[in-house]
Image (cartoon, grey):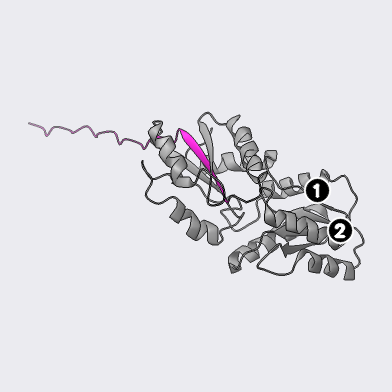
Amino acid sequence: MTDAIETPRPVARPAAPSALLLLAHGSRVPEAKEYTRALARAVGSSWAGRVEVAYLRHTRPRARQALSMLAEAGHEQVAVVPLLLLSSAFHSRVDLPKALSDPLGRAPLVTPVLGGTTGEPDKRLVAALRRRLAELDVEFDAVVLVATGSTDVGAYAEVAAMASALGTDLGLPCRAAFAATSTPTPGEAAEELRRAGARRIAVASYCLASGVLYRETVEASTAAGVVGVSQPLGDAPELVALVLERLRQAGAGPT
């Protein structure tokens, strides 16, 4: 008599997310949320699930509110794409886990930040920055890449690496600068470029949406005599592609 062969039971795979939550920082500037909503609409045109937005502060709904709403609507699994700083800085490492703790339903599936998962500047972000600079329709011979600012050493290095990548792509000198917290300021970076021979300097805004710091960047850069300041990345096609890529990496995006 031979031993019976037990048929292995199939392993149930976790349900794929049926909803996406874009989690932005939030701002006291009213139009800031329109940038996030525009990105949500653009992503929604390429992703079959429901797309919502939430914010860490200043604006509602907050993350827990949005997750509770989605759970009550029957979405058992939600994917969260962080739209915070474009790097693995303090907001991503500290504020994000805190904001997503103790949801009403199942813990969400959180994707990596948009800035990159390999430590190298993402080519799509470089292309999006170049797109926004082209929209200025002005000639320039040097660029200042302005991020919001962070005390995180790693985030500082990531912004500097992006400035180097953008400069290489444009074939022009490019210096990193920060709207707050870190140095150099936009004006200081522009002056450094002028000392090196630049005459027409443009500012590339390395941010996702308008806000207080973006407005301050425009004011400081204009006072420094730059030829133009690009718009936030917003719903740039390259940013939409990057969101969808993060969803694919998390097992939730279109194939």
Judged left or right of residue 47, residue 38 is right
177 drawn magenta: no
Front residue of this view, candidates 251 and 219:
219
Q: Residues within 10 Å of mark 1 (few under 14, many from 20)?
A: many
Q: Residues within 10 Å of mark 2 (few under 14, many from 20)?
A: many
Q: Residue at x 85, y 63 (%)?
A: 224
Judged left or right of residue 85, residue 136 is right
Q: Nearer the viewer, mark 1 or mark 2?
A: 2
Residue position for label 2: 226
Kindly identify the amino acid type of the residue bearing the numbered disc 1.
Answer: Leu
Relative to residue 126, is residue 221 depicted above or below?
A: below
17 drawn magenta: yes
Q: Position of residue 223 (x, y in %)?
A: 85, 62
Mark 1 element type? helix
Mark 2 element type? loop
Quadrant in which the N terminus is drawn: top left
Front residue of this view, candidates 90 and 159:
90
Which region is colored magenta?
1-25
Mark pair 1, 2: CA separation = 13 Å
Ranked by sequence position, the earlier of labels 1 and 2 is 1
Front residue of this view, candidates 218 and 118:
218
Q: Residue at x 55, y 31 (%)?
A: 47
Residue position for label 1: 133
Relative to residue 183, is residue 30 depicted above or below?
A: above
Q: Position of residue 42 (x, y in %)?
A: 63, 34
Q: Position of residue 170 (x, y in %)?
A: 81, 53
Q: Tell me which secondary structure the magenta stretch mostly adopts.
A: loop
Q: Is residue 196 visible?
A: no
Front residue of this view, candidates 241 and 78:
78
Kindly identify the amino acid type of the residue bearing the numbered disc 2.
Answer: Val
Q: Residue at x 61, y 33 (%)?
A: 41
Q: Is residue 52 visible?
A: yes
